[in-house]
Amino acid sequence: MQTTMIPAAPARLQPRGWQQHWREAIRDPRELLSLLGLDGLAGVSDAAAAQFPLRVPRGFAARMRPGDPNDPLLRQVLPLDAELRLVPGFSLDAVGDAAARAGHGVIHKYAGRALLVATGSCAVHCRYCFRRHFPYAEQTAAAAGWRAALDTLRGDDSLQEVILSGGDPLSLATSKLAELTGALSAIPHVRRLRIHTRLPVVLPERVDDVLLAWLSALPWPVVVVLHANHANEFDAQVDAAIAALRTCGATLLNQAVLLRGVNDTVDAQAALHERGFAAGVLPYYLHQLDRVAGAAHFEVPDHEALALHAALRTRLPGYLLPRLVREVAGDGSKRPL
Ligand code: SF4
C-alpha cells in the first residue's frame, strides 16, 4: 500500500535560553587558549585551575583578541602560576566577611543595608575575586527557601536596603528570585533593593523577558550595580541588555576593580567609563584590589592608584569619575583613598 508522506513541519527556531549559554561555558584553559590561538602559553597553571576552576561564557571569550596573551579580558579569567605564590598580607577572607555574618547567608557591615549571599554560582570566574575562598556551601541565603535569611532581615528594622550578591544573584532562576522578593515585600522596613551582578556583561542572554517582567513588577526602587573592568567587555548585545534593564526603571551603576595589566592606565580607565556611559551606566566605585590570597599579581600600589585617579579627574567630567575606594574589614563604609 502506498502511503502519502506528510512532510515534517519545519522545526521552529527557538532562541536558546540563557541556561544553555551558561552550560556551554568554557571550563578548560586549554580550550580557551586554543580558541585564541595561544596554545602552550607559558605561566598557565593547572594547579591554580584546580583551586578555582576556569569558567568563561563563550560570548565573553569572543570579545577577547585572538593571539594576544595580554588581552585584558583574558587576564581576568586565566589561571596562572602567580596565583600559587603565598604573599604576606593576602588572606582567605580579605574583607572580613566572616566577622560581619549576621545570619545564614546574610552579611551586615554598613548601617541600613544588609547583603544576601544569594548563591555561590557565577557565570564567569574572576581570578581576583574577593570571595574566591568563601565557604558558599555553608552560607548561601537561597538554601532552605530563604527562610533563615528572611528571619534575619525581618528581625532588624534598621535595614532599609537589601543587597543581592553572591556569587552572582542572577545566576539563580528568576522564579527563585521572585520567591525571595515576594517574601521581602511583606517586610515593611525594606524600602530599596540592590542587585550586584556581572551577568548582564558576561552573559547578556540572562536579561530575558522573564527577568525583565520580574524586575518591572518589584515594589521598590531598584539599583543594579554591574561589574565591568574594561571597555572591551561591552558589545552590542551587552548594550541591548543594559537598555532593557533601564526600561524596567532600574538605576544602573558600574563598579570596577583596579587591576594590574587589565585597566591600570588612564586611557583604559577613561575608555571604560566613557563606554559604560554610552551604554547607559554611570561609574560608581573603582575598588583597590581586595587582598585575597591568589590575587597579589593584580595589585596596583596606592600611590599609583592615586596618581591614575588624579589624572582621570582632569580627563573626564565629574559624573564619569568613579570613587576610588578600598574596603577595610571592620570599617563602617568603604574607605576613600
Ligand atoms: S562575578 Fe563577582 S562574585 Fe563572581 S567570580 Fe567574578 S568577582 Fe567574584
Image (cartoon, rainbow, N blue to C red):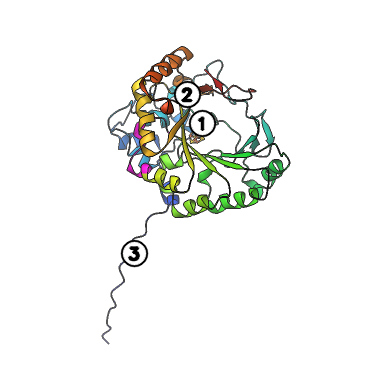
User: Marks 3 and 1: in contact by CB < 8 Å?
Assistant: no
Residue 296 vs residue 323, the one in the foreground: 323
Mark sitting earlier along the chain (1/3)? 3
Q: Foreground: 241 or 123?
A: 241
User: Which numbered tag is attached to residue 83?
Assistant: 2
Given residues 333 and 169, the one toward you in this image is: 333
Q: Kindly report the distance in space between the C-alpha atoms of the residues bearing marks 3 and 2.
A: 47 Å
Q: Which of label 3 and label 2 is nearer to you?
A: 3
Relative to 108, is 217 above or below? below
The CA span between labels 1 and 3 is 42 Å
Q: Amino acid at mark 3?
A: Arg
* Residue located beneath label 3 in the image: 12
Q: Which mark is residue 51?
A: 1
Residue 159 picture quarter:
top right
| Magenta run includes residue 38 | no
Q: x, y (%) of residue 52?
A: 50, 33
Number of the front mark, 1 or 3? 3
